[in-house]
Amino acid sequence: MSGNLANVPPMTENERRAISAYIENEFGIRMPAIKKTLLEGRLAKRVAACGLPDYGAYFDFVTKDLAGQDEYLHFMDLVSTHETSFFREQRHFDFLSRNVLPALCGDEGRRSISVLCAACSTGEEAYTLGMLIDSSLRERRRNDMSFFVEGLDLSNKAVNIAERGVYLSERIKKIPDELQKRYVMTSKDRTKDLCRFVPELRRNMRFHTGNLLGDLALLQHFYDIVFCRNVLIYFDRSNQHRVIATLLNRMHPDSFLFLGHSETMLSFDFPLRSVAHSVYIKK
Ligand SMILES: C[S@@+](CC[C@H](N)C(=O)[O-])C[C@H]1O[C@@H](n2cnc3c(N)ncnc32)[C@H](O)[C@@H]1O
């Protein structure tokens, strides 16, 4: 079943209200009236692809019809923004390399490092963390220590990309040369401008599809480092509070929380001590 995009009528105000309210309630992502064009633009192709007459029918299909389960994955992917890159907001990775990893990797009694990359999108942030931790352990010859980076995102499509660990060479350029040499393999097929992370790194990476506002039982660990960057900006204050409270429950004392550069927890009363711009230690 597939229809013509030109036949999809404009989104009515009732449809916009219903779809926006659902997205805010389920995923926390604010969808005020001003975002109507964006919402319409993102969903129009799917309405047509499903052969449905309008946005209302599409919304019913994804939320009420068992047959719409697969389409729900597209819906979740389309309502969020997945912009990301390797070494995005570089200052955080500098802080990690200078101030956090020397202490963790140099701790003689420690045997592992656990990291959560919440809202990991297509995985670039998680692999950046993986490369830096692995390098730091190698430098200190800590063969006795292991680590893992767990990535979580609402978008199943983004998580599949992260799991494969295959990226366009263009995106890899942001990774410093010495790290590229150690961790990135280029495709043998020269017509495909693709790179993949080496298996030795990929085996320390795990990715899950999940909702930060939902049941996070799939996260079985307590973490030493949590990255939750550039997602809270889409949430209202009460959902920001809810997400941080959930993450704090999963963090060891003295563990580190990194938020996006434009996100801050200073107005909330959490057991967090600020140690750098949008970097906190759990008290
Ligand atoms: C702009 S990207 C940020 C990616 C990465 N953290 C970074 O800073 O580069 C925001 C990501 O948050 C995810 N997201 C939005 N709402 C979410 C939710 N309720 N639970 C999990 N992930 C969510 C989106 O799917 C998207 O991939």
Image (cartoon, grey):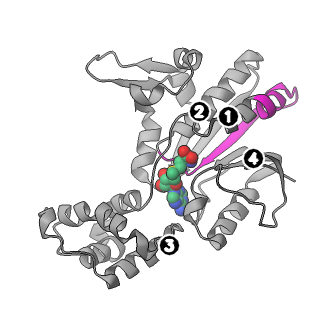
Q: Tell which circle, 2 or 1, labels the residue nearer the N-terminal end.
A: 1
Residue that protrudes farthest toward the bottom in the picture: 14
Residue visible at 55% across and 16% down?
Answer: 177
Cα–Cα gap, marks 4 and 3: 28 Å
Residue 128 bears which disc, if any?
2
Is residue 148 placed above or below 179 in the rendered structure?
below
Residue 277 bears which disc, if any?
4
Look at the image and give the residue range highlighted in magenta.
98-121
Asked if ligand 1 lies within 8 A of label 3, the reply is no
Cα–Cα gap, marks 1 and 4: 12 Å
Nearest to the observer: residue 199 or residue 132: 132
Asked if ligand 1 lies within 8 A of label 2, the reply is no
Q: Tell which circle, 4 or 3, labels the residue nearer the N-terminal end.
A: 3
* Three-letter amino acid code at the position of disc 1: Phe
* Three-letter amino acid code at the position of disc 4: His
Find residue 91 and report its horizontal and vertical position in percent: 68, 36
Q: Tell which circle, 4 or 2, labels the residue nearer the N-terminal end.
A: 2
Cα–Cα gap, marks 1 and 3: 31 Å
Q: Decide whether residue 203 is among the magenta residues.
A: no
Badge 4 local density, few (<14 within 10 Å), some, or many (20+)? some
Q: Are marks 1 and 3 in contact (CB under 8 Å)?
A: no
Residue indicated by mark 1: 93
Can residue 28 be spotted in the picture? yes
**Image check: 3 left or right of 240?**
left
Name the secondary structure under disc 1.
helix
